Every structure is written in structure tokens, then in C-alpha cells.
Image: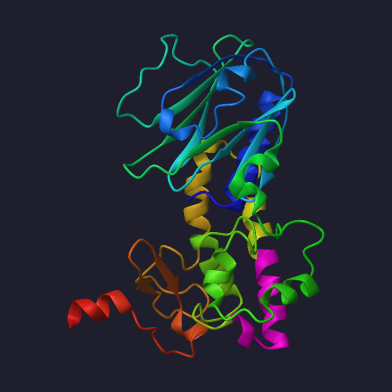
Amino acid sequence: MPELPEVEALGRFLEERLAGRVVDRAQLVSVAALKTYDPPLGAVEGRAFEGVARYGKFLALRAGELFLVMHLGRAGWVRWSERLPAAPPRPGRGPLALRVRLREPEGAGFDVTEAGSQKHLALYVVRDPQEVPGLARLGRDPLEDGFTRAAFAGMLTGERRQIKGVLRDQSVLAGIGNAYSDEILHTARMSPFKLAADLSGEEVTRLYAAVGTTLAEAVERARGLAPEDLKAEKRTGMRVHGRTGEPCPVCGDTVREVSFSDSSLQYCPTCQTGGKPLADRRLSRLLK
């Protein structure tokens, strides 16, 4: 799933290429992906893009008085092309959901795609990004100036959920998903199952620093990369996420995994849990 660093880099890439360019055609291929109908998608045609803003994992492309907002879900992405196919796209079983063609240079534009059978991609045409329900509910962005240690501590006060879940909650912190929450907790040397309200002052400070450094470093690694290179960069930059069975780059212990119904987390026992493996509930049920 694209998370804050990849979406940030993708937004910068698109802004450099779209600023001042006029939309010639906006062709919807996946009807289910478009979540709004007023204004219609066609209303962006003939308008020039004026900027791209990121809100958590959302991207908002401004076209005149309208915004084309997208949330890429689990498997969505944007593919830039200097020469799109001349033939109009046809609805089908392929990954293409939306094609936006620019007037100049002729043939340039981008496709919004979504791989796999589970469809979570969401597109909106709105007059104000805050009209998008998920965007309006977003919590604080961890890259903004107002994200201070005091503000972070306030978010955790009285929070009885496990810290892994709190970091992933978009209404608390906008933009962090499964992968970067694993990386943040590894950097902070903290168990993903620890209750947020039980963190000491020193642990809050350590976790706050880990949020900032992990995301800032990932954004810097992604800076200037083309969209087709961002996913590979994300994978290579991970220290524990997606690396079950591999040695921890800090201590050399074996990275472990806890599986859930639709996701999994990875962690280092030595760095994060005092050397004790966490219970894998799904595996435990299978062994009964």
C-alpha cells in the first residue's frame, strides 16, 4: 500500500509535470472507482492543473476551481506517460481505472491503475478537498510543523489500544500504514503490542523521534524518483517490514512475523520485545 513517503514523492513528481497543463480528456474506465457525481468527472476537462497537495495518503490535483482527489488504496498507482495510447481505453478486467490526457504536449498524460481483485481505489471530483469524507477525518500530519512532541504525547494520553494500531489510525496520524509503523516501532525499539497509554515519558520521546526520522528519511530516499521506481525503493529501504526470516540489520536476530486475517506485522525480538517472540494468534489456532 502506498504510504506517506511514496504519496509525497508521487505528488511532487506530478506537480512538476502537470503545472499549467490543460486537461484534454478524463476517461473513466472503472465506474466503481469514482465516488462522486457532482461535479462530473468531465468538468475537469479544459481546465489547467494548478498544483498538487497531499493529505495523508490522499492526493488532491487542483484544476481551476475543482479538485481531482485520489486515494490509491492497497494496490492503486499512477503511471505517467509522454505518449498515451491513441485508442480510447475500454472497460474490462485490466488494472486501468482512469486515464487523463493533456492537450500539450500531444499524447502526454497519466493513468490511474489498480492491481488485484480487491478494489479500494477511490476517485473524487470536488470543489473543496474537505468534502471527501476520509480526508475530512484525517488526524495530524507527522511532517507538518505543528506535530510536536507535546502534541504527540497528547494523542497517546488515555489511549488503551496497542501502539501499532494507534500509529496506523488515520484519524490520529495521517499517512502511516502497516509498513512504516513496523519500521517506526523497530527504530523506537518498541513492541507493537505495547499499550499506548502505558508508554513512559522516555518511550514517548523515543517513539516521537522515530516517527520523524523514519518518515523524513523515506521521503528523502524517494525524492526525485519516477513513479515506477518508488515501490522498489520502499521495499529496499525496509529494515524489518516484509523481511520475515532475514537477519535484523541492527542486532542480527531473525525478524519474526505476526499474521492477522488480512495483514501481518514484522518485528525483531531482540530489539523490540526483550528477546521474546510475540504470539501469532492465527498460527496458534491452526495448531490446535
Left or right: where does residue 137 sit relative to residue 191?
Answer: right
What residue is drawn where x is 31% and y is 24%? Answer: 92
Q: Is residue 209 magenta?
A: yes
Q: Is residue 167 magenta?
A: no
Q: Main secondary structure of the magenta part?
A: helix
Q: Nearer the viewer, residue 35 or 260?
A: 35
Relative vertical location of residue 154 with respect to residue 131 in this rendering, above or below = below
Residue 206 picture quarter: bottom right
Relative vertical location of residue 69 with respect to residue 244 in this rendering, above or below = above
Total residue callouts = 0
Answer whether residue 58 is visible to the viewer in this image. yes
In x, y percent, where is residue 166? 58, 70
Q: Residue furthest left?
A: 288
What residue is drawn where x is 62% and y is 88%? Answer: 198
In x, y percent, where is residue 121? 47, 40
Left or right: where does residue 192 sit relative to residue 201?
Answer: left
Q: How is the image coloured?
A: rainbow
What residue is drawn where x is 50% and y is 77%? Answer: 192
Q: Nearer the viewer, residue 252 or 179?
A: 179
In x, y percent, where is residue 245? 34, 71
Left or right: where does residue 84 sit relative to residue 108?
Answer: left
Residue 242 picture quarter: bottom left
Residues in magenta, as a range: 196-213
If the image is split into quadrants, where does the C terminus sit? bottom left
Q: Residue furthest front?
A: 38
Residue 225 picture quarter: top right
In x, y percent, where is residue 162? 53, 78
